Image (spheres, rainbow, N blue to C red):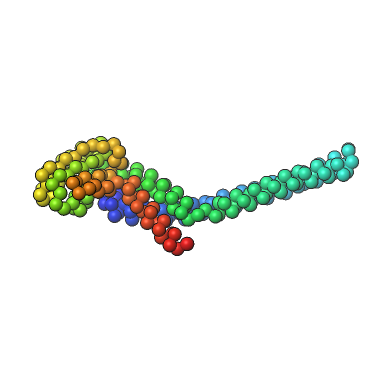
Amino acid sequence: YLVDAARVLEVAQAQASRIMGSVRKRAVELVEEVERRASERLDQARREAEAAGYEEGLRQGREEGLQQARELLERLEALAQELVVLRERLLGLHEEDVVKLALAVAEKVIGRAAEEDRELAVRTVHHLLTQVSGAREIRIRVHPDDLPQVEPHQEMWKRLTEGTRTLAIVADDRVPPGGAVVETEFGAIDSSIETRFREAGEALMVVLRGES
C-alpha cells in the first residue's frame, strides 16, 4: 500500500491519469452507441411516417396524411438535434471536470486501501514528526481505529523529537483512516489522504490552466 505522503500523491496522480483516459474512452463509446441507436430509430420512424402518410392519404386525403407525416418527421429531427447537442457536451468535457472526477474516484480507491493497511497511520505520523523541529508541545490526532496501532510508538516518538516536553496522542474521528495531524506551538501539519488529494488536484489545475 502507501508508504508516505509523497507516495499518496504519486499514486493519486497516476490513478487520475488512468481514469481520465478511461472516462474519455467511455464517453466516446457512449456517444457512438447513442448515435447508432438514434440513427436506427430515425430510419424506422421515417419509414413508419411515410407509410402512415400514404394510408392516411387514402382515407382522408393525401395532403392531410402527408402533413401528419411531416409533423412526425419534424419531431424526430428535433430529437436528432438534441442528440447532437448531447454529443458535443459529452465530448466537450472540460479537462478540469475530468480531473475532478478522476481524483474523486482515485480518492475512494486509495481510501479503501488505507482502511485495510492498519500500519499506514504509524508511517504517516513518523513521517510528519521528522518535519517537526524545536517543538516542546506535540499533539498527534489520528482516526479512532488507528489509535491502537499508534499509541505503542508514543515513547519512541518522544525520544525522536529532541527537546519535546509532552507528546500526546488523541483519537479524532474527523481524521480519516491512515491520516494524521500533528499540532505544535508553531502550527499544525496535516497529512491526511483528503489533504494530499486536494493538493494534488490544485497542482493539476494550475498545470491545466497554464496550458490552456
Decide which of 89, 136 is in the foreground and name it: 136
Residue at position x 60%, y 49% in the image:
86
Residue at position x 44%, y 59% in the image:
209
Image label count: 0
Tell me if residue 93 comes above or below residue 108 in the rendering.
below
For this view, does 90 lie left or right of residue 14? Answer: right
Give percent across and percent down for residue 152.
Answer: 15, 40
Residue 6 visible to an observer of this rendering: yes
For this view, does 31 lie left or right of residue 48? Answer: left
Give percent across and percent down for residue 179.
Answer: 28, 44
Give percent across and percent down for residue 205.
Answer: 41, 56
Decide which of 185, 69 is in the foreground and name it: 185
Return the residue found at the far front: 186
Give percent across and percent down for residue 21.
Answer: 47, 55
Decide which of 100, 110 is in the foreground and name it: 100
For this view, does 73 lie left or right of residue 192? Answer: right
Residue at position x 21%, y 45% in the image:
183
Residue at position x 50%, y 54% in the image:
94
Residue 33 visible to an observer of this rendering: no
Tell me if residue 102 comes above or below residue 175 in the rendering.
below
